[in-house]
Image: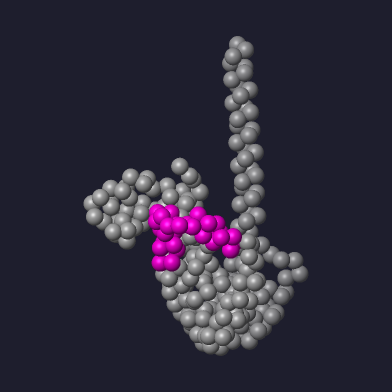
Amino acid sequence: MDYKSAERKLKRGTAVRKTLVYVLLTFWAVMVLFPFYWMVLTSVKSYGAYNAEWIPELITLNPTLQNYRDAFTAVPLSGYFLNTILFTVVTTALMLVVTILAAFGFSRLSFRGRDLAFTIFLSLMMIPNELVVITNFVTITNLDLRNTFTGLILPSVTSVFYIYLLKENFSQIPDELYYAAKADGASDFRYLCRVMIPICKPTIITITILKVIECWNSYVWPRLITDDRSYFLVSNGIQEIRENGFGRDNIPAMMAAVCVISAPLIVLFLIFRKKIMAGVSRGGLKG
């Protein structure tokens, strides 16, 4: 009897804990997702309906898509999209080449001072981004690369964090595979392409997606290095819409533009969310 009573108490305690956890997770999910809901809701309200609300309404009975049509007519938003796609694709491709080769060198090749060089390399993460931006701005300006895609892309093709993440992942591959490949006459580059990259594919996919998100959301550097609208990205387009498009008071139209710009990243994350989590967790494990 005592055993059954203790078992019931244990089950009740487990049920209470699970219920509490689900309640907290639900509350947190609502807190996180509510701004996205509010953004979409505001984007389908007309300018007059939005300004007529003394108390913000959580639903609208008369949605409109006019704000989305205005988003592509007030400023050349489609051109900003093309610029951003070009910037993102080229930057991510170059970054992958640099990251994979650097991670391979630090994890597999043996040379004098490798550990010291990697430690110094990691110390670059301690430098504030503001100092890096200033240095890059001076360099790009001296090279006369302002208002060019080259000037936009070059400072973004390396990342200490991504190299570190992939290097740790490469280091988990057993040395025996490398020695066996060398015994078979495989070159280092062939071993990298045929063995290391396929094994570490989840981490490489994760780095690729994170870099795409980083490039798509890039604002400070493009805004600093370009003042020609022909090179504006979508992040700069938001400011352009606010200043020269809808005006500062047309919040629904601004929210429609933000929805349009955010949609590709949301879809990308929903498609590859499992690979992102798997790659980050794999890169953080050692042994």
Q: Residue at x 51, y 60 (%)?
A: 117
Question: For residue 152: magenta?
Answer: no
Q: Residue furthest front?
A: 112
Q: Residue furthest right?
A: 54
Whole-percent x, y for residue 145 in the image: 52, 85
Q: How is the image coloured?
A: one colour
Viewer-closest of 83 and 267: 83
Picture quadrant of residue 219: bottom right
Confirm whether residue 283 shows in the render.
yes
In the picture provided, is 229 more to the left or to the right than 24?
left
Magenta-drawn stretch, dominant element (helix, strand or loop): helix
Whole-percent x, y for residue 224 in the image: 61, 80
Quadrant of the image containing the N terminus: top right
- Residue 143 versus residue 136 in the image, above or below: below
User: What's the magenta region?
Assistant: 97-125
Q: Residue furthest top?
A: 1
Whole-percent x, y for residue 160 in the image: 53, 62
In the picture provided, is 36 more to the left or to the right than 167?
right
Quadrant of the image containing the C terminus: top left
- Residue 176 versus residue 265 in the image, above or below: above
Q: Residue at x 42, y 52 (%)?
A: 170
Viewer-closest of 88 and 239: 88
- Residue 112 versus residue 20 in the image, above or below: below
Confirm whether residue 73 shows in the render.
no
The number of callouts visible is 0
Question: For residue 114: magenta?
Answer: yes
Viewer-closest of 178 and 54: 178
In the picture provided, is 50 more to the left or to the right than 184?
right
In the picture provided, is 175 more to the left or to the right than 56?
left
Whole-percent x, y for residue 142 in the image: 56, 86
Q: Residue at x 54, y 77 (%)?
A: 234
